[in-house]
């Protein structure tokens, strides 16, 4: 018996070790293979929905599908009702094979250039922070995107006031939404299409209407119609439109500088600026998103310093979106700890 088991051991041991070695070798090979696949085919697995590029997958879909083209849009997409109207687009809730989608149509031919710019940005910037493109048809001037039933960030208070969402009306969720918004600015300022400025943001309401609230209470940017490129080191600056901007929401460098000289506004004499205009607007947008909720005061207290820096009159002294993002994330941790210590 003893001999049997010992000879069994001396037979089994090398076999087990051999198997283990083979297993390790094969997993190493699989790992190297997969790494090769991901490196060589990086473009093929690039959408956040896990699809190939130029594909989409709605939450109600099992598989990815190629962006819809004119023929499919004309025959398979049916308008249900108007859900939004801006200067550039009329937005409809629509049905595509039982899936709800948003159909945006050019509202006035005068804005076709903005519409086309928005579409090219939508294609170039597809990411988890950007609304998902489902298809487009240029001859119809129509764009199909994922539909977000909660609509734009302007609806935030109404949505959180609904009894079924009241448990989400917390400083945690609201700070997370504000962090999403700053993440989007960081993405636009360092995007695959260069450093982009969010120009369609001359008032708080206008700015909020460019973002959508997703079903899982995150924020995506929706309207990319006015995203000019800047390159401050290369001297490439922009102006958001050719008309005079006024008020406290826009950055001071966006205001007509010769107002005290009683010189009438002239676009030719108006100096251009860079993406730091977006940073100036962060405290006001975050203040709106945070609203008035228990724990919110503590968050505002922690954000006081960085928000003060965002409001520096000199653009170059304002923090980058990345600096603000880092602060928001650390404030989240700090407030969680302080709330815990108070219990
Ligand atoms: N995918 C969507 N899901 C839900 N609502 C949407 C969607 N897309 C747009 N909307 C609604 O339609 C409104 C107008 O859309 P959008 O901002 O794209 O139009 P616009 O004409 O470009 O506006 P602007 O006048 O700011 O240029 C949004 O603020 C939002 O309320
Ligand atoms: C999704 O893809 C699988 C595998 O290719 C297929 O069997 C299935 O029918 C597809 N589902 C739909 C809804 O097209
Ligand atoms: C596209 O245009 C055609 C005719 O030009 C029209 O019949 C169709 O309804 C349009 N489709 C959409 C989705 O706008």
Image (spheres, rainbow, N blue to C red):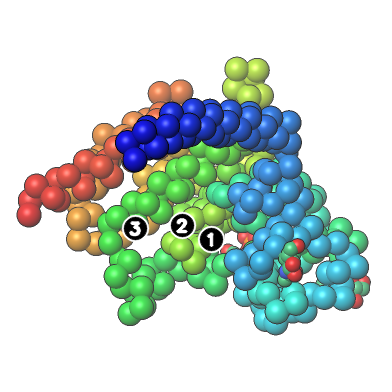
Q: What is the spatial separation of the Cα atoms under label 1 and label 2, in whole angstroms?
A: 8 Å
Numbered tag placed on residue 218 in the rendering = 2
Most distant residue in the bottom direction: 80
| Residue 221 at x, y percent in the picture | 57, 52
Q: What is the spatial separation of the Cα atoms under label 2 and label 3, in whole angstroms?
A: 9 Å
The answer to whether 47 appears left or right of 210 in the picture is right
The answer to whether residue 173 is visible is: yes
Kindly identify which residue carries mark 3.
Answer: 173
Numbered tag placed on residue 236 in the rendering = none
The answer to whether 289 appears left or right of 101 in the picture is left
Q: Residue at x 21, y 48 (%)?
A: 336
Kindly identify which residue carries mark 1.
Answer: 212
Q: Of the residues under marks 1 and 2, which one precedes in the sequence?
A: 1
Q: Residue at x 79, y 75 (%)?
A: 77
Respond yes or no on whether mark 1 lies under 8 Å from ligand 1.
yes
What element does badge 1 sit on? strand
Quarter of the image with the N terminus is: top left
Q: What is the spatial separation of the Cα atoms under label 1 and label 3, in whole angstroms?
A: 15 Å
The answer to whether 90 appears left or right of 13 in the picture is right
Q: Quadrant of ligand 1?
A: bottom right
Q: Of the residues under marks 1 and 3, which one precedes in the sequence?
A: 3
Query: What is the crowding at mark 1: few (fewer than 14 residues within 10 Å), some, or many (at least 20)?
Result: many
User: Of 116 and 341, which appears nearest the observer?
Assistant: 341
Say if mark 1 contacts mark 3, CB within 8 Å: no
């Amino acid at each position: 018996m003893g001999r049997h088991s010992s000879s069994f051991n001396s037979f089994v041991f090398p076999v087990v070790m051999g198997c283990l070695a083979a297993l390790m070798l094969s997993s190493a090979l699989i790992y190297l293979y997969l790494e090769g696949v991901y490196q060589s085919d990086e473009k093929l697995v690039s959408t956040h929905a896990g699809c190939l590029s130029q594909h989409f997958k709605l939450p109600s879909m099992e598989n990815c599908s190629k962006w819809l083209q004119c023929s499919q849009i004309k025959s398979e997409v049916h308008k249900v009702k108007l859900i939004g109207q801006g200067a550039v687009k009329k937005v409809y809730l629509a049905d595509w094979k039982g899936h709800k989608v948003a159909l945006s149509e050019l509202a006035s031919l005068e804005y076709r250039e903005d519409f086309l710019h928005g579409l090219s940005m939508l294609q170039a910037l597809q990411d988890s922070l950007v609304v998902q493109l489902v298809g487009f048809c240029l001859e119809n001037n129509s764009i199909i995107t994922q539909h977000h039933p909660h609509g734009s960030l302007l609806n935030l208070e109404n949505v959180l006031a609904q009894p079924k969402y009241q448990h989400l009306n917390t400083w945690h969720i609201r700070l997370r939404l504000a962090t999403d918004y700053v993440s989007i600015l960081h993405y636009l300022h360092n995007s695959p299409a260069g450093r982009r400025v969010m120009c369609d943001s001359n008032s708080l309401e206008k700015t909020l209407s460019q973002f959508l609230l997703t079903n899982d209470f995150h924020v995506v940017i929706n309207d990319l119609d006015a995203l000019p490129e800047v390159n401050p080191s290369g001297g490439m600056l922009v102006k958001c439109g050719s008309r005079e901007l006024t008020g406290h929401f826009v950055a001071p460098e966006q205001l007509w500088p010769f107002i005290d000289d009683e010189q009438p506004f002239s676009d030719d004499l108006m100096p251009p600026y860079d993406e730091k205009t977006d940073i100036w607007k962060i405290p006001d947008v975050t203040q709106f998103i945070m609203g008035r909720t228990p724990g919110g005061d503590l968050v505002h207290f922690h954000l006081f310093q960085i928000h003060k820096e965002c409001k520096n009159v000199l653009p170059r002294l304002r923090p980058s979106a990345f600096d603000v993002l880092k602060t928001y994330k650390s404030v989240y941790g700090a407030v969680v700890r302080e709330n815990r210590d108070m219990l």
